Image (tube, helix red, strand yellow):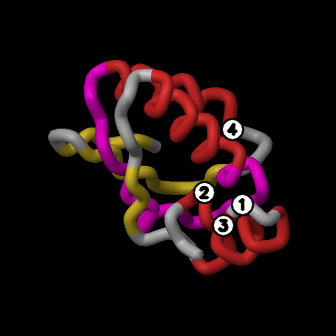
Amino acid sequence: MIVREGARMVLSGPVTLANVAAVLEEGRRHLEDGVESVDLAGVTEMDSALLALLLAWMREAKSRDRSLTLANPPQALSTIARLYGVDTLLGHP
């Protein structure tokens, strides 16, 4: 699900309500270890749980005085973020 490449996490497979809790915790461990970006190109299925997950990770990074950038967000993520009015929080206006 998450592969670490230096300061980057590569997320792959589905991220839905069914597995988001496990992905959240796995990602938090990487954030504690200095991850600075998340590559979403490998996400194969998503729902609003992915948006919640990313916002939680971004909040976690901010609490450590760091930022977290997103690469290759799925189009559906941008659509959901716009619907919820949080697209600018993801860095994709």
- Residue underneath mark 4: 19
The three-letter amino acid code for the residue at tag 3 is Asp
Spot the residue most to the right.
83
Occupied quadrant, residue 5: top left
The residue that appears at 37% across and 58% down in the rendered structure is 39
Label drawn at residue 89: 2
- Residue underneath mark 3: 87
Magenta stretch containing residue 24, yes or no?
A: no
Helix, strand or loop for disc 1: loop
Image: 79 above or below 81: below
Q: Quadrant of the C terminus?
A: bottom right
Provide the residue span drawn in magenta.
33-51
Horizontal arrangement in the rendering, residue 36 relative to residue 93 (left or right): left
Front in this rendered view, residue 47 or 77: 77
The residue that appears at 16% across and 40% down in the rendered structure is 6
The three-letter amino acid code for the residue at tag 1 is Val
The image position of residue 48, as x and y in percent, is 78, 56
Q: Are the two marked residues, 3 and 1, in contact with CB atoms closer than 8 angstroms? A: yes
Magenta stretch containing residue 41, yes or no?
A: yes
Foreground: disc 2 or disc 4 = 2
The three-letter amino acid code for the residue at tag 2 is Leu
Mark closest to the chain's N terminus, 1 or 4: 4
Q: CA distance from mark 3 to mark 4?
A: 23 Å
Q: Are the two marked residues, 2 and 1, in contact with CB atoms closer than 8 angstroms? A: yes
The three-letter amino acid code for the residue at tag 4 is Asn
